[in-house]
Amino acid sequence: MSTNRDFDRIAEAWLAEGPTELADRVLGAALEEVHLTHQQRTLRLPWRISTMSTQFRLAAAVIVVVALGLVALNLPRISGVGGPSASPPSPSPTLVPTDTPSPSASPAAKAPAATVAELVDRVYAALHAKDGAALRALAADGAQHSVYYTDGVTGSEVTSFVAAEFDLEHDPLQDVTRHGEPLVVGDLVVVPDAFTYATEVDTGFDMFVVTHVPGGLLVGQAATFYGKPGLAIDPNAIATIEAETAAWNMADTEAVLATMTSDAAFWEGLAGSTRTIHSGAGLKTFIEESSWFDVTITGPPVISGVFVAVPNRLSAGSDTSEGISLYDIRNGKIALQVHLNGTP
């Protein structure tokens, strides 16, 4: 049986004497293997992230670390944290993660809240005061945060970061204010917000999952969805959501797709490894494989900017689960649908 020390010695020898160029066919084969592995995921329960086995997590981690290490050997070094990132549609502000803490640094102390309402209040008090320490104390360890921006024509994820490393003090974000009551379904929370920057105020939602820890509640995986100033909700948004829901319940894949744009994306989850994104041919397959359950809208929609959040229930026989879906709808079509599924 080899040990970690043996592995380190072999890896160091390979890096010292091995190839300095990674053939395109080798990288392509590795990426294809990862792609095929992802596509073979079985949907055991619709719109819910299944737990991977420990063996699969370790194998996936080894593949990713080796592949990224090989690529890094052959790419020029780029200054700045995390390398270059795609510029968001004009004019999206930039979110700034902090420097990665050193391995010797002790983890930040957490300050759990007693209730969901208290957690929401404390998060927004920290944002309003630009108190990064207080905000990080409310973020669960390892929780990630993604950011989606739309200019009304196109929309995309523009950045992602570890929540506990977010540098609020140096971010151009000046303030975040709630302009409506949060939509809460169990441990799922959606808050309508206005995001103030030096030159503009954007509107949208913060969406997060509450994490239970000893002593109370923290913010787990989260995402922000916002758009440029002046954007209004699509006048056909609610009718489009109702049409899509009816099509799901009739198991009519083509009718569901007819309510979506050609480049639509469906997110299961919000960020990092807990999220799965369906698009293109994969979206059609996902819809076909999810047609055996019904969707019921359980409350009024909440609107912020161009986005709509709707509480709903998934049911198949006696199995039911409460959740929330968030939509970016343009020209009467769904461009983005994000679904969070709660505990049955």
Image (spheres, helix red, strand yellow):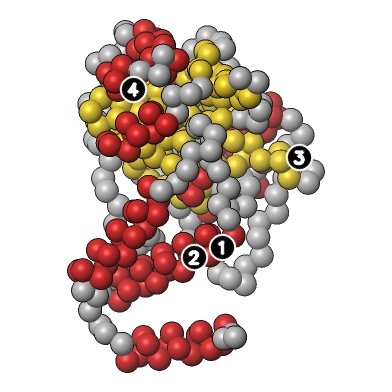
Q: CA distance from mark 1 to mark 3?
A: 31 Å
Q: Are marks 4 and 3 in contact (CB under 8 Å)?
A: no
Q: CA distance from mark 4 to mark 3?
A: 42 Å
Mark sitting on residue 216: 3
Report x, y in % for residue 263: 25, 32
Q: Are marks 2 and 1 in contact (CB under 8 Å)?
A: yes
- Label 2: how many residues lie within 10 Å, few (<14), some (14-19) or many (20+)? few
Name the kind of residue labelled 3 in the image: Gly
Name the kind of residue labelled 2 in the image: Ala
Q: Are marks 4 and 2 in contact (CB under 8 Å)?
A: no
Q: Is residue 221 above or below residue 287?
A: below
- Label 1: how many residues lie within 10 Å, few (<14), some (14-19) or many (20+)? few
Residue located beneath label 4 in the image: 253
Residue located beneath label 1 in the image: 55
Query: In the image, 333: left or right of 342?
Result: left
- In the image, what residue occupies the spot 20% across and 69% down? 24
Residue located beneath label 2 in the image: 59
- Label 3: how many residues lie within 10 Å, few (<14), some (14-19) or many (20+)? some
- Label 4: how many residues lie within 10 Å, few (<14), some (14-19) or many (20+)? many
N-term mark: 4 or 3? 3
Q: CA distance from mark 1 to mark 4?
A: 35 Å
Name the secondary structure under disc 4.
Answer: helix
Mark sitting on residue 145: none
- In the image, what residue occupies the spot 48% across and 56% down? 98
- In the image, what residue occupies the spot 63% across and 24% down? 319
